[in-house]
Amino acid sequence: MKKITLTMLICLLCLPLWAAHQPEFSTAGFFRLENTGRDVYSMNPAWRFYKGAAQGADAKEFNDKDWMVVSLPHGIEYLPTEASGCINYQGEVWYRKHFTPDAALKGKKLFLHFEAIMGKSKVFVNGKQLTEHFGGYLPVVVDVTDVLDWNGDNVIAVWTDNSDDPSYPPGKAQDVLDYTYFGGIYRDCWLIAHNNIFITDPNYADEVAGGGLFVAYNNVSEASADVLLKIQLRNETKKSFAGIVEYELQQPDGQQVAFLNAKVRVKPGKSVSSFDKLLVKNPLLWSPSSPALYNLLVRIRDEQGNVIDGYRRRIGIRSIEFKGKDGFWLNGKRYEKPLIGANRHQDFAVVGNAVANSIHWRDAKKLKDVGMEVIRNAHCPQDPAFMDACDELGLFVIVNTPGWQFWNDAPEFAQRVYSDIRNLVRRDRNHACVWLWEPILNETWYPADFAKNTNDIVHAEYPYPSCYCGSDSEARGHEVFPVLFAHPQNADKEWAIKELDPSKTYFTREWGDNVDDWNSHNSPSRVARNWGEQAMLIQAQHYASPSYPYTSYDALFQTSRQHVGGCLWHSFDHQRGYHPDPFYGGIMDVFRQPKYSYYMFKAQRPPVKSDLIAETGPMVFIANEMTPFSGKDVVVYSNCDEVRLTFNKDGKTSTYKKDKGRQGMPSPVITFPGMYDFMVDKALSRDRKQEDVYLLAEGLIDGKVVATHKVTPARRPEKLLLWVDNEGTNLEANGSDFVTVVAAIADKQGNIKRLNNYFIKFHIEGEGRILGSADIMANPAPVKWGTAPVLVQSTLKPGKIKVMASVLMEGSQMPISAELELETTPAVYPLVYNQSEAVLIPLTVTGKTDVQMSKSSAEREVERLQKELNALKLKEVERQQTEFGEQR
């Protein structure tokens, strides 16, 4: 008999002492609580996959042995970094998973919870269709209790189709859409097991403002707050149930601050909802600067005191108010500065939308590092892991319903939009990070009554304080919304709002993009990282404070408090549909490698260290690589009061002092005119004084140096560097998690050679795989602006991973290779999969470049010694050229 493999929860005591903060992620809307009878299993590993139509694939007996084996999240295919212009697959695909359930689960209530399946989909279990779903961004939940075979093989079959379809949102065809649908079962799939008297799932229960657990707040102040609680229990036994609902509220440090239990009775086959309230005195209030999260422990006990169901929810106590011309109020106080943030699409390099939970957390962390306070989920509900991250890190979120520049008059389209709105509120209503609901369709000429309906639905689903909706100020039906999206009056007059309504609060949902026309899309804001210094400097200046009237960081900081901020379009480079080029307007690229604008944003955060998980405190960054083509004017980004820049040892020094009386952005771009000169570098280098050549920026506060950044010209390419971009998070051995490993071309001192055109080939050994191969230029990967990233995914077995990088064409005078070792940690949740299927998951890519084995330590030592010998030979070449060549 086929057995399931269970990889159990890692004990915290087993974590290495050096481990950084490790995020945790909810499953189907909750966090597991021990000894409640409720268990969570990951169904992600080992699915058979087929691209195309497959007649009869819904049947249990269908022969899928020739299909490839993949794990979820899965996006149908790997794609190159330049994957715009509709090069991705659109059409039908099939997934089939074989498993035998553990006998210990028999008698339990069992639900499959797909976090999302792209497009229209059907879910079958053992040949029986359990649901059909339209839309690619919200949960698909099915009850599998009565369809499982406890004596043999079980098959989950999922048909999904991401083809253009105007009958459900977004509805717009991809070839006229400004982002890419991608496809597949691209988020997690969970098996939820609990007893037959249980807390319901709000998306499955399908009740207005009901189902599951609902937490809201009233009378919030620094002195006290009411925590409003509503919970739905269902009894699927044949006897009436009498028991209690128990709530325990714990502070972040684990201290209990409130406790409540209430009696509850549920008849057989029925559901009931219980309403309660906790009073919390001197609450720790959630805010972007102090995102305090309480743990709410919920237990259902029978009359004997036995726990029969329960889980944990993280909650943040806060109040939100939009007061028209008086602006935004948080926790009873007016928010005195603009809220600056960015939009975010959910795709990543190579994998498209099939992004691991840890990547969602790292995205949020990187945005918080630069001081952002609000993220707009463009243009769809995003992964629950991203919402969890925003709760924890202190990022407000504008939650969007799927839709972009498309309306269909057919009644079914509006009804499916309404269904999406209901389900996104039910899914996200307990998140502290929810700032604003955006239920309308982005930039769409829908009917006015539709706008009113969307607003009414949100308030019906969230009938408590701190619930607000926003709409485009020019859209039909905008009058019913308290928050309107518009450009400020000090921006480009073509786009700026002409007249402010004192009853409305304003926010700029997208700012910064600046195209020549909506066909060509040339823009000073759209800059690929590898276009180099001048392009990136122009982008950063455009976002900061351009010389022409435009919505910018500086402009948003000069608005009244009625205009409460804005979200940059867009945080990261992303793929598009109708345009052949990716969107290059991000402050980081598709691998999340920073551009200069990233550091410009970082300079706007307060220069004060705090207890936030994200980076805080003073910073200074020199946006000049000291190449022969670098500008003479040196740009520096810093949040310090004073910046001192020095060019070369015993060279010239210049000092900038911030004008504290200036209105606008906290830290304007700093330019030191005429500071850098390559000819000075050349003269010192010819005199063998290369170590004297550098740019040194020192950030000072109250006369003391608190931050420094030193740039040295990169000399001869000598070696590769390797590092992991993981924000200190573990790589989990669940077959789905992945990290970015970055290779860089560097000189002998480790300075990255930005101007370089090598290709880097990667090889991997141990418990990992490289995502993508030569066919999409993932491996070997081209060096862009000095670096070449690759994605490394875990297997299902914890262990070590060795990554080796070398230049594609090796030679005695080429840079020496590098190796990096990672170690994966056990999966957090038990994994359900068929072992015979799992062994067929490819561990390596195929192709010429993958046959190279990792070099032994002896071979690498020979390579190093050869490099030293080459250096001696080159000294002779240098002497000859100095004696007989042109010296100046």
Image (tube, helix red, strand yellow):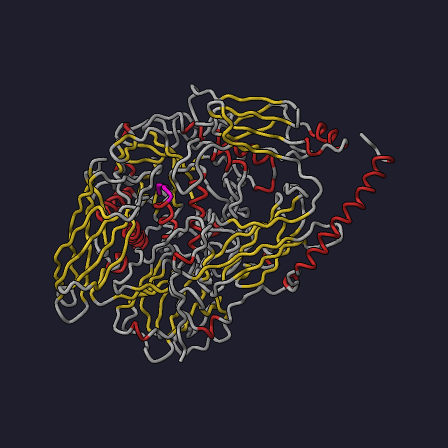
Q: Position of residue 365 (x, y in %)?
A: 43, 44
Residue at left offset 24%, top offset 59%: 310
The magenta stretch is: 393-397
Q: How many marks?
A: 0
The image quarter in which residue 283 lies: top left
Q: Position of residue 698 (x, y in %)?
A: 55, 28
Q: Position of residue 598 (x, y in %)?
A: 50, 37
Residue at left offset 35%, top offset 51%: 408
Q: Please state which of residues 693 and 331 is positioned toward the viewer in this rendering.
A: 693
Question: In the picture shown, does residue 412 fall above or below 463?
Answer: below
Query: Is residue 839 magenta-colored?
Result: no
Question: In the picture shown, does residue 65 fall above or below 631?
Answer: below
Query: Is residue 394 magenta-colored?
Result: yes
Residue 492 visible in the shown view: no
Q: Position of residue 372 (x, y in %)?
A: 41, 37
Q: Please state which of residues 12 and 853 is positioned toward the viewer in this rendering.
A: 12
Q: Please state which of residues 659 and 729 is positioned toward the viewer in this rendering.
A: 729
Drawn side of residue 552 relative to residue 437, left or right: right
- Quadrant for the C terminus, please: top right
Drawn side of residue 271 relative to residue 480, left or right: left
Residue at left offset 43%, top offset 77%: 62
Drawn side of residue 262 relative to residue 62, left or right: left
- Quadrant for the N terminus, please: bottom left
Q: Please state which of residues 435 and 660 is positioned toward the viewer in this rendering.
A: 660
Drawn side of residue 471 relative to residue 841, left or right: left
Residue 794 visible in the shown view: yes
Question: In the picture shown, does residue 880 fall above or below 36?
Answer: above
Residue at left offset 43%, top offset 56%: 15
